[in-house]
Image (cartoon, grey):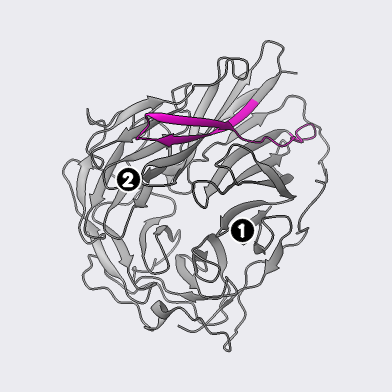
Amino acid sequence: MVKKVYWIGSLLATLLLACLAGTIIYKLQSPMKATPTPVLQAVIPTLSSPPAVTATASPQTAVTTTSMATSTATSSTSEASGPAIQALAPGSPVTLDKIQMVNPLVGWATGSSGLDEHILITGDGAKSWKDVSPPEPASTGAPGKRAFTFFLDVDRAWVTYFPTDFPATLPITIWSTADGGSSWQAGTLPVSSELEGGSAFDQLYFVDSQHGWLGLSHGAAAGSNPFSLHMTSDGGRSWQLLVTPFSPVSGSLDACCRNGMVFLDNLTGLVTSGNGAYLNAYVNWTRDGGLTWQNQDLTDFPAEQVDAPFCQSSSPQRLTTQSAAVVVDCITSRSDQTILHNAWVHIIADAGQLWSIFELPSPSEDSKNWASWQRSWKIQFLDSQSGFVFVVDHYENSDGSATKDASTVYQSIDGGQIWNLMGQTNWSGQFSFVDADLGWAVVRMGKDIALVSTSNGGRSWEIIQPATIQK
């Protein structure tokens, strides 16, 4: 049976969804007509009816981080105007969209309640949350605003808001905090004659408290997605335009489909990309702070494992000031009409001059009863030796009325050479670990969303019912 393969293009330019890095949709021939109800074994935990992340008042809960003492968020200078997004009152319902824990107690999240996303912080291991949203003007009607964030540590974060279903126009406000959201400063991406029309969020990364880069996309065409890059060296108070769309120094940044950006220091950075118009996986490197970029091919694999592959790079992560990790996954349609889907982690050092390549695990898939199947690999390294890989599968029947999700968690303690199976679930998750044992995930199972945590490296998970509390 021949399986037709369709790659996900970059959805960053449409604002609603990030490009599904490392994700492939398999369209399978002759799917079952009846609605499938397969059951995934070794489900941990079973979330047949996961609770929405609905807050209940918990006035006795205290958040202990010192950076959360100030009760109101303020801005010093801002182009923004109009009534600000109103903070959630204690006990207000909120659905977490993204979580990033910094240590066992303190972490950040974005959450939805009403039209606009909120910025939340916890000081007790995700049990309770404070709304510390910046004074971004609230939406006056649908569709609302989505928050795009970068969380550096317990105190420092950056946020910019874009409409959820159409591009924004310059100037654009980028909010920054250095005290855990107690106060916010507004920086502005100014109007430029070199950037016409609408802009969509693409990438945001800070290497330290002062140096950061913001990427925007500017529409899309066949095989291309025009890109501009902006840089700050003062913590986000001011921004400089470095790269304009289709600049001769931009390498292949304008090709579809960018899905991640990291910098190792103030000068060295890389951008990963999905397939777009290219068959090979590649990254774009800069070694001068983002002023110029060069394309580098990553498809250097044993011939017996990959034959004429269709590859992409994704999930970049800074390991040290000298090294980074990147996922490369490849799909190959073989002469015997079977399909190979493999993934590797590339440990890159010396700005792309030195490489170590280790194969990532591929759990068995369950596509026989489903019309389509998606798989993605995401990595999170805690340091240069210890890390996790999350393999997330999504299945649908022919009309989308029935779905199934699965996440498989593996851990490595030797820099990615060997991966040990930790657990498997019946949901898809956005994961955040702070050490080899403690982790959290925003769980999606169909239309239901929940927050869960593990204290044993992903072998088992418990549902958290968080509460919003007073500032």
In the picture, measured across the screen, residue 7 lies left or right of residue 207, that is right
Element at label 1:
strand
Answer whether residue 430 is visible to the viewer in this image. Answer: yes
Instruction: Identify residue type, mark 2.
Output: Gly
In the picture, measured across the screen, residue 97 lies left or right of residue 48, that is left
Q: Where the N terminus falls, by quadrant?
A: top right
Crowd rating for badge 2 (residues with CA inside 10 Å; few <14, some 14–19, many 20+): many
Query: Residue 78 at x, y = what percent?
Result: 23, 67
Q: What residue did someone put label 2 on?
A: 215
Q: Where the C terminus falls, by quadrant?
A: bottom left
In the picture, measured across the screen, residue 24 lies left or right of residue 400, that is left
Query: Residue 290 at x, y = what percent?
Result: 26, 40
N-terminal-most mark, 2 or 1: 2
Query: Farthest residue in the left direction?
Result: 193
Q: What residue did someone put label 1 on?
A: 441
Query: Does the residue at mark 2 contact the one at mark 1 (Cβ under 8 Å)?
Result: no
Report, in whole angstroms, how far the alpha carbon at label 2 lies from the one at label 1. 27 Å
Instruction: Identify residue type, mark 1.
Output: Ala
Answer whether residue 195 is visible to the viewer in this image. Answer: no
Task: Write the start and end of the magenta stretch as one range.
Answer: 341-370
Give the mark toward the camera: 2 or 1.
Answer: 1
